[in-house]
Image (cartoon, rainbow, N blue to C red):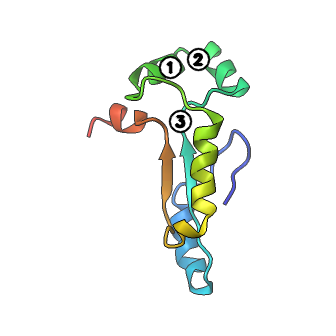
């Protein structure tokens, strides 16, 4: 499932599609990136102070790289992830866990 660039896939879509398409052998997963060091990410960070607060809260202490996201996508598409289905993978350096406070 792919959302529009800069947009979002409807929350829970991967779960719904996994249930619907699993019987025919298809898998459905989604990926939610954190703050990634791209031209768009840099522009957002420059105009929104909240972005810097999220970067500061990231346990790994840095923004993500395109390669970080690409590596996870490659795994998700590989045969090694053949039993991965119906989930959203966070590639955010742990920021969601940090700001959620669990």
Q: Nearer the viewer, residue 19 or 42?
A: 42
Q: Earlier in the sequence, mark 3 or mark 2?
A: 3
Q: How many marks?
A: 3
Residue 23 picture location, percent across and down: 57, 86
Q: Residues within 10 Å of mark 1 (few under 14, many from 20)?
A: few
Q: Are marks 2 and 1 in contact (CB under 8 Å)?
A: yes
Q: Are marks 3 and 2 in contact (CB under 8 Å)?
A: no
Q: CA distance from mark 1 to mark 3?
A: 13 Å
Q: CA distance from mark 2 to mark 1?
A: 5 Å
Q: Which mark is residue 50?
A: 1
Badge 2 is on which residue? 48
Q: Which mark is residue 96?
A: none
Q: Which mark is residue 34?
A: 3
Q: Residues within 10 Å of mark 3 (few under 14, many from 20)?
A: many
Residue 24 picture location, percent across and down: 62, 85
When asked about the image quadrant of residue 97, the answer is top left
Question: Which residue appears farthest toward the bottom when viewing the image?
Answer: 23
Q: Residue at x 57, y 57 (%)?
A: 75
When asked about the image quadrant of residue 53, the answer is top left
Q: Residue at x 51, y 60 (%)?
A: 12
48 lies left or right of 56:
right
Q: Earlier in the sequence, mark 1 or mark 3?
A: 3
Q: Is residue 83 above or below residue 54?
A: below
């Amino acid at each position: 499932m792919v959302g529009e660039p800069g947009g979002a896939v409807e929350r829970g879509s991967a779960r719904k599609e996994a249930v619907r398409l699993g019987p025919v052998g298809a898998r459905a997963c989604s990926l939610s990136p954190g703050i990634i060091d791209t031209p768009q990410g840099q522009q957002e960070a420059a105009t929104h102070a909240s972005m810097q607060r999220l970067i500061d809260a990231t346990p790994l202490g840095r923004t993500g790289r395109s390669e970080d996201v690409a590596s996870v996508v490659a795994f998700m598409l590989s045969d090694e992830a053949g039993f991965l289905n119906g989930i959203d993978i966070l590639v955010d350096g742990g920021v969601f866990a940090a700001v959620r406070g669990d």
